[in-house]
């Protein structure tokens, strides 16, 4: 991405996230939890740095839908919680330079300090800034795998194996992810 994006995921943290745990991450952007709150990060030129708290607290052992959107013309990131815009945070970055670092789910840059503790499902990444109504629709539906702005969609429905497939129509094997550890494959989200 060069500055416009939407990241979405269903998450169920197993604790209050006292240390950092990445849900969606690449060197220049991240959606993660830390110190009991949800954080977002967008950095210019593939540099490293710190994220910004959304002031939305972690709710352990509950499924929630989280999303972060950003336009390349703005240094602000909009944070959505269960389909509702709950905070606008200043990231400081407008345009971003693509880099060769891996796109990862559940960790950041092989750093053990950033492993997410809990469950993650239905990860989507768009190269556009989704609207609140689009995010609310994504939250309640499977797919949209033909959307031209969709870059990656991981539904976690494989059931076995060590490959997490990008379900976007026309996606290449190079956008599939390798699973580490011994995951369990349960697709049970209880939400209210």
Image: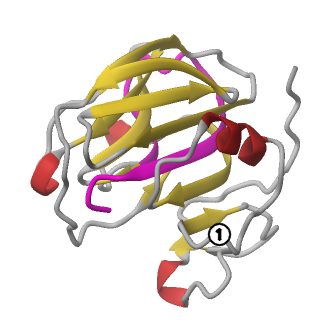
**Residue 189 image point, x, y percent:** 85, 37
Q: Is residue 77 above or below residue 141?
A: above
Q: Is residue 97 left or right of residue 190?
A: left
Give the residue at mark 1.
Answer: 147
Q: Is residue 167 left or right of residue 72?
A: right
Residue 82 picture quarter = top right
Q: Which residue sits at x=59%, y=20%?
A: 15
- Quadrant of the drawing holding the N terminus: bottom left
Q: Is residue 26 left or right of residue 33?
A: left
Q: Which residue sits at x=44%, y=61%?
A: 127
Number of numbered discs? 1
Looking at the rendered structure, the secondary structure element under dot 1 is loop
**Residue 118 image point, x, y percent:** 63, 35
Q: Is residue 17 above or below residue 119?
A: above
Q: Is residue 188 magenta?
A: no
Report the magenta residues as a range.
Answer: 1-24
Q: Is residue 146 left or right of residue 187?
A: left
Residue 16 picture quarter = top right
């Amino acid at each position: 991405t060069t500055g416009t994006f939407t990241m979405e995921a269903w998450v169920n943290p197993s604790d209050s996230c006292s240390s950092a745990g990445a849900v969606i991450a690449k060197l220049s952007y991240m959606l993660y939890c830390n110190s009991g709150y949800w954080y977002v990060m967008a950095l210019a030129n593939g540099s490293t740095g710190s994220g910004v708290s959304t002031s939305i607290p972690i709710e352990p052992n509950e499924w929630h839908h989280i999303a972060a959107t950003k336009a390349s013309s703005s240094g602000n990131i909009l944070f959505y919680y269960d389909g509702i815009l709950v905070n606008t945070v200043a990231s400081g970055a407008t345009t971003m330079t693509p880099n060769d670092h891996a796109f990862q789910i559940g960790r950041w840059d092989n750093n053990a300090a950033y492993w997410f503790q809990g469950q993650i499902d239905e990860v989507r990444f768009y190269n556009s800034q989704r609207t609140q109504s689009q995010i609310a629709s994504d939250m309640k539906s499977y797919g949209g795998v033909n959307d031209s702005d969709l870059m990656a969609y991981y539904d976690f429905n494989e059931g076995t194996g060590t490959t997490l497939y990008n379900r976007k129509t026309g996606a290449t094997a190079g956008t599939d992810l390798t699973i580490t550890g011994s995951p369990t494959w349960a697709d049970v989200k209880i939400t209210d």
